[in-house]
Image (cartoon, rainbow, N blue to C red):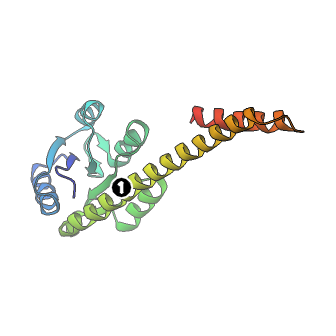
Amino acid sequence: MVDALKVMILEDRKQDQELVKRQVLKYNPKSVFLIAENKHTFTSKIEWFVPDIILADYNLPDYTGLEALLHVKEYKPTVPFIFVTGGLHKRDLIAADILKGADGFVLKDDLQTLHIRLAEIVENLQAKIKLNASVAVNKIELKMRILKAISMLSDADDFSHKETIMEILRSLSADFMEK
């Protein structure tokens, strides 16, 4: 489990903020929270705060959760985003969830399941981090093999297509440098 989960909550109602906090603390008692109650507060705080997860109501007086999601996907695309709302029907949230890239939703009437959803998201995030690290290691290993092949070929006696093969290997090596 993560030591301290940094949670940003976009919610205009104090009572709902507290209920969400309580459920998050069931998952991780060391969680820290940053609250945004409107568009201005959310967009200004998200510039400097890097949360581990964002929990957002769908309907706010001057902003929607969908607008917040689009903002997050543009500026903090790797941060998981969950709708926590009571203002929409489940089918509407599923559509928004699928079409816009949210990591899920929890209805306020079913808030007691939020800690379970958080566990799933954190587990998926950790798996994705491990996969990305593994891919990075594989790329480095492949790059080293290509460089070793170039070195071996440059020391080898001339043979037909030697320069062509070396040029292909150099090109592959350059491709890895760009990524």
Residue 27 location in percent, x, y?
Answer: 17, 62
| Spot occupied by residue 4 in the image (x, y as percentages of width and height) | 16, 49
Residue at 50% across / 50% down in the picture? 135
**Quick one: 17 or 172, which is closer to the camera?**
172
Q: Residue 70, how many percent across, how many down?
A: 41, 43
Image height check: is 48 above or below 114? above
Q: In the figure, is residue 102 to the left or right of 86?
A: right
Disc 1 target residue: 125
Residue drawn at (12%, 58%) of the image: 25
Question: Is 29 drawn above or below residue 139 in the view shown?
Answer: below
Who is closer to the viewer here, 40 or 71? 71
Residue 155, image quadrant: top right
Residue situated in front as seen by the camera: 93 or 143: 143
Q: Residue at x 24, y 68 (%)?
A: 116
Q: Viewed as shown, does residue 55 lie left or right of 160?
A: left
**Quadrant (top left/top right/bottom left/bottom right) for the N terminus:** bottom left
* Residue 98 at least partly seen: yes
Asked where in the image residue 120 lies, by quadrant, the reply is: bottom left
Please report the residue visible at 30 percent of the width from the left and 31 percent of the height from the top.
Answer: 47
Residue 139 lies, in percent from the top left, at 55, 45
